[in-house]
Image (cartoon, rainbow, N blue to C red):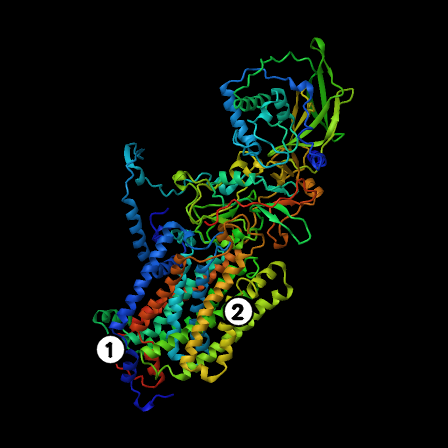
């Protein structure tokens, strides 16, 4: 598991060496990155909401020094240690994360991340935002994925197409592709990252025991692995009947001790009702007999 | 607070097909009438005393027939609402096709207690009231201590639900065990029956009761909490309905919790948001349940506290001396 | 028998057994005292109604405290009606006749009040009717409510049926009966004229009731024991809890009957009817049921004590040598073992010593229920952490104590009223047994 490996690495580094905080080096080319827009009070407000939801549980309320007691200490972001960093450094750290700080690359949109920085900067009166730099025209690869299921091979075939110069398209070789299946709380990666061949194709085996819906349908997504965001990519989605058919009964279908009254086991209902009827039948009979005593005196 | 404590008259019921029931009620009623009236008289005396106060703070209210009226704020009382609870029907039916499950990785828990705070905020709980509590465990004298977050195990054979006399706590088709605090009579049999000590009781007026007065009861969030009724972890049923992870799972800074749907064989980590296969996670890490020998069939799994990431630190208590 | 058989006439029996049926100063003072005490306790209950169960010392771990111990005690004491009337009565033990009404009075009083005691333990007592509206037949609480109600009605009928003839006699022959009560007695005596058909109906009804009473009584206490035994907690998770509770109930009930016999005999001058023989025999009954109870106690503690499973070991440690040890040994020795030893000797089965032994047994019986209910909850399977100190150890509050006392006052009121306005010894039956049943009704 990727996460566990990361944790293990972190563990090895953090024990005794105390280098964890210092070794979080931001690549030089990232330090100078600046936002493509001017921060506004509106953005700060949006950023605050995002901060409260995603950051506050560790970093605490801004300016209150009530951050969580973790190792390494997350620290209060209104303080100097955070504020001396460039916007680019902050942006990189939020984007890439470093255990135990989560990577927000896939959790927050790029603009969201900048808004959080806008909020963090609002606690620094000395901060002057560097001039926004409009995003340069895109020069990297533009890759579009398509997906289909090959019955004879029992495999999912993802083909990557690339925009070549002058509006032409061709197969994209050497592109890293990841396959995800949709689950209730998020997307789950299926198999490892695979690289497209010269035909721009890559094949994934789909585990036959992975549950789909009751007809075996699963929603799968193929995405390009592009951690540094150097490409412009379009993922491919499909609903395929390749999962295990899953139609488990609801957990309350049985009649059990713990069922609601209407689902009580029949024998309990019968025993209870019959006992009550019999005993109270006798009681009513006795009450009726007692009534008769009064009439008998006249006889 | 109720404004009357007289027992419901037997004629209140719509469900009186059974003549034996009527008889029971009559007899209990006969026996209880003496004391109950005495108590009622005393009690209504109190209410009367309380009512005489005037705050001077006038509130403008819209009546049912559309008139605006001015009422002293102390005169405003919440109505006994029946059949208006949020999610009254869906709250019992659950989310179709799901079987929710939780995995708690003990190797990552360092007692940050963010789960607890987030949970207590969401459910309007006092600091000593836990739906989720982290316990400092040590299984044997020679084994290492560890922190164990403990919440309701949402058992598939729930002893608490078995003993409930009035269907106030119930199991849903999606596996969640919920409480209807508009039904609960406060007998606390469920607390006695739960081997995990997962249930709590509102012994005194719930936190900020005045603020939440009149708020519609939401059975999937169990708020507002009510004096004299049970509360416990609900797997954040309200969040699940929106496809969101439970409060505690999302609040954990250390990646302790995974939450998901057993039917999909997938759980999502609340911190990293990574989704993994449930079966593989349990298989690779030696997943286990708490006290499986009791046959309760919990829906919460634990991953053993091996290769812990952080040195063990004694927990410090911030709870009040007495409540 | 110390009574002079020759002098025994119907009028003498009537006078002996009914001379106390009048409103006198002592009665009014006693009732006044009880009423005032009850009002104080009801005030405490009104505080609980207003502020919630938090006014008591019970909290999230020890969630059942004195109220539930009290409930178990009241159910237990009420069981004696069944032992005396049904079991021993059906076997045909004639010496029991003068005791049956005392036993039934105790049964009715304790069963009626047991129903109220459980209401005092409810977080939302105004929802009592929900038990009937939404009752789940899988819950032992529904069974308990059902059988206690049934047992109460059966006991009430069993108290009433022999009273029909007695009331027919009283409203004619007792001059001290307050005049406003005369029409009530006349109405309740159902025009009883000692007609053979009337006697036949009464006798047949009593026989049916006696038979129904046995399963009903066994059920009330077995089901009450299941409130604990259906859980998996150490100290409650036991298969002998039903008979353990039932036998314990007979001990408490026999003691209650002996105490009542003693005071009725003294206050209502019934020495000729409740003789030393009756005390001697009741002493033997108490010794017998105590021995049975001892047997179940040994089972209850020796078997888990042999295996010492983790949770059981903690539980037994606390009881035998820990926090609850002093109370535990006082209860076990003073309420069970020492009484059994004393009761083996004839001289301790005389009225006064027997009453004192019974009082000790009765008090121990209450604390025994406390020891069954509370300590188990103080050590659940998982540790109690991060909660206030008063969650960890249960300490009853003053309000809670007052609310616990209230049912005792109520029982005393009920027993006083029944014994004051009806013959403590069945009048008609005694006359029939003595062969002086030449009652003329106009």
Q: Secondary structure at mark 2?
A: helix
> In x, y percent, where is residue B311?
66, 42
> In x, y percent, where is residue C307?
64, 64
Q: Residues within 10 Å of mark 1 (few under 14, many from 20)?
A: some
- Quarter of the rendering occupied by the C terminus of chain C: bottom left
Residue positioned 59% across, 60% down in the render? C314
Q: Quadrant of the rendered structure where residue A12 is? A: top right
Question: Could you say which is closer to the camera, residue B318 or residue A119?
Answer: B318
Q: Residues within 10 Å of mark 2 (few under 14, many from 20)?
A: some
The mark that comes first in sequence, 2 or 1, is: 1
Residue positioned 44% across, 51% down in the render? B186
> In x, y percent, where is residue B24?
39, 59
Q: Which mark is residue C125?
A: none
Q: Residue B267, relative to residue A127: is it above or below? A: below
Q: Residue B275, relative to residue C188: is it above or below? A: above
Q: Chain of mark 1?
A: C
Q: Quadrant of the rendered structure where residue A114 is? A: top right
> In x, y percent, where is residue A132?
58, 14
Q: Secondary structure at mark 1?
A: loop
Give the labeled residue for mark 1: C174
Q: Quadrant of the rendered structure where residue C85 is? A: bottom left
Give the labeled residue for mark 2: C329
* In this view, the mark in front (2 or 1): 2
Asked if badge 2 and badge 1 are on a common chain, one would say yes
Question: Could you say which is closer to the camera, residue A164 or residue C296?
Answer: C296
Q: Is there any visible trace of residue B12 in the rendered image? A: yes
Q: Are marks 2 and 1 in contact (CB under 8 Å)?
A: no
Q: CA distance from mark 2 to mark 1?
A: 51 Å
| Residue reaching furthest to the bottom | C6
Q: Chain of mark 2?
A: C
Q: Is there any visible trace of residue C425 in the rendered image? A: no
């Amino acid at each position: 598991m990727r996460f566990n490996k990361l944790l293990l690495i972190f563990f090895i580094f953090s024990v005794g060496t105390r280098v964890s905080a210092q070794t979080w080096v931001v690549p030089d080319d990232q330090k100078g990155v600046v936002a493509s827009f001017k921060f506004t009070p509106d953005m700060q407000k949006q950023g605050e909401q995002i901060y409260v939801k995603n950051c506050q549980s560790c970093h605490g309320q801004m300016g209150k020094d009530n951050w969580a007691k973790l190792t390494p200490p997350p620290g209060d972001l209104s303080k100097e240690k955070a504020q001396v960093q460039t916007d680019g450094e902050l942006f990189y750290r939020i984007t890439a994360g470093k255990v135990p700080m989560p990577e927000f690359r896939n959790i927050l949109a790029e603009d969201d991340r900048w808004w959080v920085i806008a909020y963090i900067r609002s606690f620094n009166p000395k901060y002057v935002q560097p001039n926004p730099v409009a995003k340069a025209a895109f020069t990297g690869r533009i890759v579009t994925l398509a997906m289909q299921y090959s019955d004879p091979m029992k495999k999912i075939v993802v083909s990557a197409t690339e925009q070549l110069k002058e509006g032409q398209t061709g197969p994209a070789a050497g592109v890293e592709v990841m396959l995800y299946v949709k689950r209730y709380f998020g997307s789950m990666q299926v198999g490892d990252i695979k690289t497209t061949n010269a035909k721009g194709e890559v094949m994934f085996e789909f585990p036959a025991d992975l549950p789909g819906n009751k007809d075996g349908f699963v929603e799968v997504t193929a995405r390009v692995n592009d951690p540094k965001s150097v490409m412009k990519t379009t993922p491919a989605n499909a609903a395929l009947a390749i999962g295990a058919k899953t139609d488990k009964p609801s957990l309350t279908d049985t009649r059990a001790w713990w069922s609601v009254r209407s689902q009580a086991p029949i024998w309990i209902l019968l025993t209870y009702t019959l006992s009550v009827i019999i005993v109270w039948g006798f009681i009513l009979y006795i009450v009726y007999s007692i009534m008769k005593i009064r009439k008998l005196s006249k006889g | 607070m109720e404004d009357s404590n007289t027992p419901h008259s037997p004629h209140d019921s719509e469900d009186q097909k059974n003549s034996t029931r009527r008889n029971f009620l009559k007899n209990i009623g006969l026996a209880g009438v003496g004391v109950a009236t005495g108590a009622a008289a005393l009690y209504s005396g109190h209410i009367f005393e309380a009512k005489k106060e005037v705050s001077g703070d006038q509130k403008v209210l819209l009546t049912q027939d559309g008139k605006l009226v001015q009422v002293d704020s102390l005169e405003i009382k919440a109505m006994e609402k029946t059949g208006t609870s949020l999610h009254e029907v869906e709250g019992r039916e659950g989310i179709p096709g799901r079987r929710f499950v939780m995995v708690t990785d003990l190797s990552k828990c360092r007692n940050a207690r963010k789960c607890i705070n987030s949970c207590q905020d969401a459910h309007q709980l006092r600091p000593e009231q836990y739906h989720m509590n982290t316990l400092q465990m040590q299984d044997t004298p020679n084994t290492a201590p560890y922190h164990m977050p403990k919440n309701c195990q949402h058992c598939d054979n729930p002893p608490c639900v078995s003993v409930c006399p009035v269907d106030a706590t119930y199991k849903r088709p999606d596996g969640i065990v919920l409480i209807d605090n508009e039904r609960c009579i406060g007998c606390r049999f469920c607390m006695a029956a739960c081997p995990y000590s997962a249930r709590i009781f509102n012994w005194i007026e719930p936190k900020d009761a005045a603020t939440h007065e009149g708020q519609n009861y939401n059975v999937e969030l169990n708020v507002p909490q009510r004096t004299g009724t049970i509360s416990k972890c609900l797997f954040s049923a309200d969040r699940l309905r929106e496809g969101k992870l439970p409060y505690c799972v999302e609040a954990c800074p250390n990646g302790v919790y995974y939450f998901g749907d057993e039917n999909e064989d997938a759980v999502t980590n609340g911190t990293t948001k990574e989704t993994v296969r449930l079966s593989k996670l349990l298989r690779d890490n030696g997943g286990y349940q708490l006290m499986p020998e009791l046959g309760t069939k919990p829906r919460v799994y634990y991953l053993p506290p091996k290769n812990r990431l952080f040195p063990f630190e004694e927990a410090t208590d911030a709870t009040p001396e007495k409540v | 028998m110390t009574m002079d058989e020759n002098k025994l006439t119907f009028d003498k029996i009537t006078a002996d057994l009914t001379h106390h049926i009048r409103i006198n100063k002592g009665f009014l003072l006693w009732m006044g005292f009880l009423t005032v005490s009850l009002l104080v306790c009801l005030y405490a209950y009104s505080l609980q109604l207003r502020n919630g169960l938090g006014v008591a010392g019970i909290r999230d771990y020890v969630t059942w405290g004195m109220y539930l111990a009290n409930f178990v005690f009241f159910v237990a004491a009420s069981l004696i009606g069944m032992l005396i009337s049904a079991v021993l009565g059906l076997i045909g033990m004639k010496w029991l006749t003068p005791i049956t009404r005392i036993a039934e009075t105790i049964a009715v009083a304790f069963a009626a009040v047991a129903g109220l005691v459980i209401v005092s333990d409810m977080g939302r007592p105004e929802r009592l009717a929900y038990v009937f509206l939404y009752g789940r037949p899988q819950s032992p609480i529904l069974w308990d409510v059902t059988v206690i109600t049934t047992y109460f009605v059966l006991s009430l009928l069993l108290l009433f049926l022999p009273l029909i003839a007695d009331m027919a006699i009283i409203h004619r022959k007792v001059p001290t009966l307050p005049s406003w009560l005369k029409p009530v007695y006349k109405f309740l005596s159902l025009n009883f004229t000692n007609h053979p058909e009337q006697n036949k109906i009464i006798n047949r009804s009593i026989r049916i009731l006696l038979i129904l009473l046995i399963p009903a009584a066994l059920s009330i206490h077995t089901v009450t024991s299941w409130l604990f035994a259906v859980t998996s907690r150490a100290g409650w998770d036991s298969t002998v809890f039903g008979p353990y509770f039932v036998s314990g109930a007979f001990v408490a009930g026999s003691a209650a009957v002996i105490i009542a016999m003693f005071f009725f005999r003294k206050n209502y001058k019934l020495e000729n009817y409740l003789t030393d023989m009756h005390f001697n025999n009741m002493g033997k009954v108490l010794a017998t049921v105590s021995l049975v109870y001892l047997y179940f106690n040994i089972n209850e503690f020796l078997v888990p004590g042999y295996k010492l499973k983790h949770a059981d070991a903690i539980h037994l440690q606390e009881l035998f040598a820990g926090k609850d040890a002093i109370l535990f040994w006082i209860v076990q020795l003073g309420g069970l073992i020492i009484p059994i030893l004393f009761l083996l000797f004839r001289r301790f089965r005389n009225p006064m010593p027997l009453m004192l032994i019974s009082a000790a047994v009765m008090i121990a019986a209450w604390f025994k229920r406390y020891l069954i209910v509370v300590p188990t909850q103080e050590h659940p399977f998982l540790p109690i952490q991060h909660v206030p100190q008063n969650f960890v150890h249960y300490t009853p509050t003053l309000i809670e104590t007052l609310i616990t006392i209230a049912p005792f006052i109520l029982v005393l009121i009920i027993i006083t009223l029944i014994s004051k306005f009806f013959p403590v010894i069945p009048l008609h039956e005694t006359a029939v047994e003595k062969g002086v049943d030449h009652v003329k009704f106009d």
